[in-house]
Image: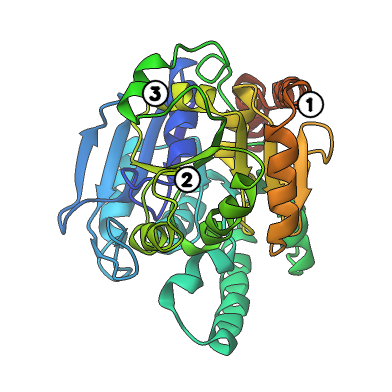
Amino acid sequence: MKILITTDIPINFTCGLTYFIKRYALLLQNKGHEIMIMCPSTSLRSRNYTSKEGLAIHGISSIPALVQKDLRVSPPLTIKRTIEKTIKKFNPDVLHVQTHFFISYTALTIAKEMGIATMGTNHFMPENVFHHLHLPKQFESALNKIGWRHLHYIYKKLDIITTPTEAAANLLRNSKFPKPVQAVSNGIDLKIFHPNYNTSNLRKRYNLTTKKPIILFVGRLDAEKNLDRLIKTIPKVLKQVDAQLVIAGRGLQEKKLKSLVSKLHLNKNITFTGFVPDEDLPKLYCLADCFVIPGTAELQSIATMEAMASRVPIIAADAVALPELVKNGENGYLFPPKNLKVLADCLIKILSDKKLRDKMAQKSYQIIQAHDVNKVIKKFESIYKEITKKP
């Protein structure tokens, strides 16, 4: 089957969505499907190329987005002809949109005209986008409403709509979306993420001792991840447990967060790794005694699933979709997002009790088996067959 996947985020931009698309597309390709990804290019020119992972990419002419470094936008008035020409040449059986902005909308319009089956997966929460504009709260609220309306306008044209979790599906339903929504996990590759890696080289690289338990966060260092709250709990934790926090990733808040660490005199206890290469990321999770996800806008959290597959207990904000992964008191703890005392208490409980930690780690590993990416691929393949009526 020929599948065109569209996104309005450059495929080389580091975030959960692009990570999911690349991994998902490769797995489909390995199963014999012909895949093309359409996304903003890295310049004003549109071009076809093969990614280092072996995926066919069609980059659409784009300009820099002002809200964040490495983000680019394809202007709507200049892209239709290129997209139409590409779609007609590739002639896909299915268009699978992953966003609802200019590229995906234009591709959807053309696909409908050509009678191509269409589906979309929603990874979007307006709150994840508009806080980057740093507008007053009343303007953010109005923009969030506009964001949901725009999503409805595009996605109601699709044949099938999915989201990564039931919580994400319910957000869409509660926004009065008029069509049925299915929850299909982003999935996790259990052959890549597992608890059996040797971590000695990473310990040396990041100067991490074996004498202190490690608290880990992996993800973008952006405002909605609430990493300032996690950092502010560390002095409370250190009164009970001599721990170290490892923060892996890059983002707009990096400078601000490092300044906070210095202000709290925590430089000896908190390590910023910066970007971690794909080949090292699975090993990094295996260093952790506990993984913390304080974000309040997670529609699933791939990083949390990766930690669970690495047999790590989780402490997560009790918000949006995280309670679907974290069963309070079983594979970790949920905490009220703004309650730093509860967060600190949860960390102290897990880090000071190895039997509890091991029990919760094993439960994480058990829960994540249901999210095996091979099961996810089969589910999407069945949807493709359903909307194309192909055997």
Identify the residue under disc 1. Answer: 356
Q: Is residue 312 left or right of residue 267?
A: right
197 vs 260: above or below: above
Rounded to the nearest whole Å, what is the CA distance between mark 1 and mark 3? 24 Å
- The coloring applied to the image is rainbow
Determine the residue positioned at 44% across, 55% down: 104
Determine the residue positioned at 68% across, 37% down: 314
Q: Earlier in the sequence, mark 3 or mark 2?
A: 3
> Foreground: 124 or 156?
124
Q: Position of residue 310 (x, y in %)?
A: 59, 22
Determine the residue positioned at 59% across, 69% down: 153
Amino acid under disc 2 = Gly
Identify the residue under disc 2. Answer: 219
Q: Is disc 3 placed on a helix, strand or loop? A: helix
Identify the residue under disc 3. Answer: 203
Q: Is the residue marked by circle 2 packed among few (<14), some (14-19), or many (20+) residues within 10 Å?
A: many
Rounded to the nearest whole Å, what is the CA distance between mark 3 and mark 2? 19 Å
> Foreground: 37 or 245?
245
Q: Earlier in the sequence, mark 1 or mark 2?
A: 2
Amino acid under disc 1 = Leu
